[in-house]
Image (cartoon, grey):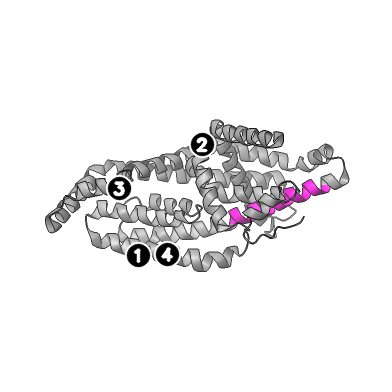
């Protein structure tokens, strides 16, 4: 009973820390993600024949981080300009929505506004979109802090092995901890790298399609498609609905809405169900039910950030739980097949 009480207190303390220190932890977690991506880019640079073993490591690190910083700054600037453009045209969008509602009211002799309000009282499209935009632009606004975290993580990379060896002097304990850290690094970096490649492909194809359709702020919607693709299950659906619904406000007609909804839906389905399984393979070992629960729980704790990162966080938990007899049953329950890797 005492152990159960300690466990509950410990879990409560961890949850309180995650919620109260989110302003510190969230940029740090994004810094970890940037570090994983930077490590991949650095390794690719080192494979270039005329650079291999000829350029100092610190120069490659500097070039890698400069490239990432420039990309993040450029994306942040483009998103902010797109949001300003959307806000400046809000009156025209509102007028188009009112005209559509009036046309439907006249055609079917109903009060559509009242029907929508009574059916989906809690749905606020503009509010949800605004909140999502604030989260994304706010995260991108912390570019410097995220980059600094990533730089310091890189600086620790060369000495972490020595530190672990000094903490765990027993050779068996050191080997176990090293194996766990290696497994976490490999699984997390593989997932982030492959998921990023798939998300860039999805966002890129979506951007071209939205440009061809003449949708305003196409880059913003494409970035939304890219970012939401990290959210399991509901991410692709949400990324399809938002620009499609917005097209109603922009064009004031149902036909573009239908084309965009179907077009983005086909793109998401093909990449998500045909290409992504071939690219990613079996990089994860998570139960689909656990994935949904993780999405909900981490979404409550860290909002949009929690939804974006729920999968890699849960993968790390499974790896750690699987290495200790007391927590191994939890790892088995969280896994997809009940089979867990022995390190």
Q: Which residue is mark 3?
A: 120
Mark 3 element type = loop
Using a 10 Å C-alpha cutoff, classify the residue at mark 1 as few (fewer than 14 neighbours), some (14 to 19) or many (20 or more). some
Specify the principal SS of the magenta part.
helix
Residue 44 percent location from the top left of the image: 65, 56
Nearest-to-viewer mark from 2 and 4? 4
Q: Nearer the viewer, mark 2 or mark 1?
A: 1
CA distance separating discs 2 and 4: 31 Å
> Badge 3 local density, few (<14 within 10 Å), some, or many (20+)?
few
Pick whichever of labels 4 and 3 is earlier in the sequence: 3
Report if the CB atoms under discs 2 and 1 are less than 8 Å apart: no
Residue behind mark 4? 267
Instruction: Tell me which residue sits at (71%, 47%) in the image.
Output: 327
Q: State which tag comes first along the sequence, 3 or 2.
A: 3
The label on residue 125 is: none
User: Is there a contact, CB below 8 Å, between mark 3 and mark 2?
Assistant: no
Front of the two marks 4 and 3: 3
Judging depth in this view, the residue of 334 and 200 nearest the camera is: 334
- Residue 265, placed above or below residue 9: below
Residue at the location (32% across, 43% down)? 124
- Label 1 to label 4: alpha-carbon separation: 9 Å
What residue did someone put label 2 on?
142
Q: How many marks?
A: 4
Q: Which residue is mark 1?
A: 262
- Badge 2 vs badge 4, beta-carbon distance below 8 Å: no
Query: Is label 2 in a helix, a strand or a loop?
Result: loop
Q: Helix, strand or loop at disc 4?
A: helix
Q: Is residue 128 above or below residue 20?
A: below
Question: What is the C-alpha distance between the residues marked 3 and 2?
Answer: 35 Å
Tell me which segment is drawn in magenta: 175-193
- Mark 3 or 2: the one toward you: 3
Left or right: 106 in relation to 140: left
């Amino acid at each position: 009973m005492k152990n159960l009480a300690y466990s509950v207190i410990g879990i409560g303390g961890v949850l309180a820390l995650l919620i109260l220190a989110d302003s510190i932890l969230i940029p740090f977690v994004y810094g970890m993600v940037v570090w994983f991506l930077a490590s991949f880019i650095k390794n690719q640079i080192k494979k270039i024949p005329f650079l291999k073993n000829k350029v100092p490591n610190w120069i490659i690190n500097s070039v890698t981080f400069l490239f990432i910083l420039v990309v993040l700054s450029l994306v942040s600037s483009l998103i902010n300009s797109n949001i300003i453009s959307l806000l400046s045209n809000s009156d025209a969008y509102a007028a188009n929505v009112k005209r559509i509602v009036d046309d439907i009211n006249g055609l079917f002799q109903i009060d559509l506004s009242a029907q929508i309000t009574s059916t989906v009282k809690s749905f606020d499209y503009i509010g949800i979109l605004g909140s999502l935009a604030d989260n994304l632009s706010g995260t991108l606004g912390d570019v410097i802090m995220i980059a600094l975290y990533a730089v310091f993580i890189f600086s620790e990379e060369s000495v972490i092995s020595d530190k672990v060896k000094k903490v765990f002097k027993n050779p068996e304990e050191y080997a176990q901890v090293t194996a766990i850290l290696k497994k976490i690094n490999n699984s997390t970096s593989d997932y982030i790298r492959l998921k990023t490649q798939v998300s860039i492909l999805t966002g890129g194809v979506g951007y071209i399609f939205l440009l061809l359709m003449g949708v305003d702020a196409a880059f913003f919607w494409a970035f939304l498609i890219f970012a939401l693709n990290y959210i399991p299950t509901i991410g692709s659906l949400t990324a399809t609905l938002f620009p499609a619904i917005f097209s109603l406000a922009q064009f004031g007609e149902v036909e573009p809405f239908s084309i965009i909804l179907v077009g983005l839906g086909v793109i998401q389905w093909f990449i998500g169900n045909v290409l992504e399984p071939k690219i990613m393979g079996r990089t994860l070992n998570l139960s689909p039910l656990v994935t949904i629960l993780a999405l909900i729980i981490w979404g409550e704790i860290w909002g949009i950030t929690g939804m974006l990162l729920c999968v890699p966080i849960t993968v790390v938990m499974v790896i750690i739980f699987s290495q200790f007899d007391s927590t191994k049953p939890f790892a088995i329950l969280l896994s997809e097949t009940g089979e867990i890797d022995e390190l």
